[in-house]
Amino acid sequence: MYDDDNDDSNSDSVINADQLLSYGNECNNGEMSQAQMGDDTLASCWDMAKADKGNFVIDCGLLYHRDQVEGPESLSIVRA
């Protein structure tokens, strides 16, 4: 399951939410997508994203968590 206390993000895993759709729509994400979808602990996160709840977002087949802390909104990829 997504862990709010896990703050090991780096610049490669966090992008500005406003830039998500223009960030690189190549959708070259096979391994990460399979890992996320294969992780049973993320099932509720996928359900929340599909229901537009819990600040979870699906883009290009990947699950992200939307967050804002003193600045612009950002999306962090949910790690499986």
Image: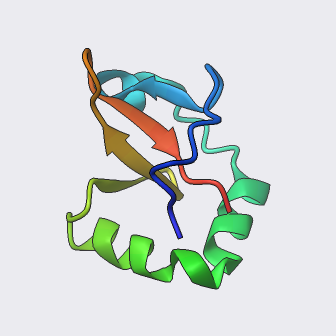
| Horizontal side, residue 47 vs residue 35: left or right | left
Residue 37 at what x, y percent from top left?
Answer: 62, 74
Tell me what residue is drawn at x 50 percent, y 62 percent.
2
Q: Quadrant of residue 79?
A: bottom right
19 relative to 43, above or below? above
Residue 21 visible in the shown view: no
Residue located at (21% from left, 73% from top): 51
Quick one: which residue is furthest to the left in this view? Answer: 52
Q: Residue drawn at (64%, 66%), measured in percent from left and top?
A: 36
The reply to whether residue 16 is visible in this rendering is yes
Nearer to us in this view, 20 or 9: 9
Tell me if residue 23 comes above or below residue 33 in the rendering: above
- Which image quadrant: the C terminus? bottom right
- Image quarter for residue 41? bottom right
Q: Quadrant of residue 46?
A: bottom left
Is residue 56 left or right of 33 when viewed as pictured? left
Residue 8 is situated, as x and y percent measured from the top left of the image, at 65, 35
Between residue 10 and residue 59, name the one nearer to us. 10
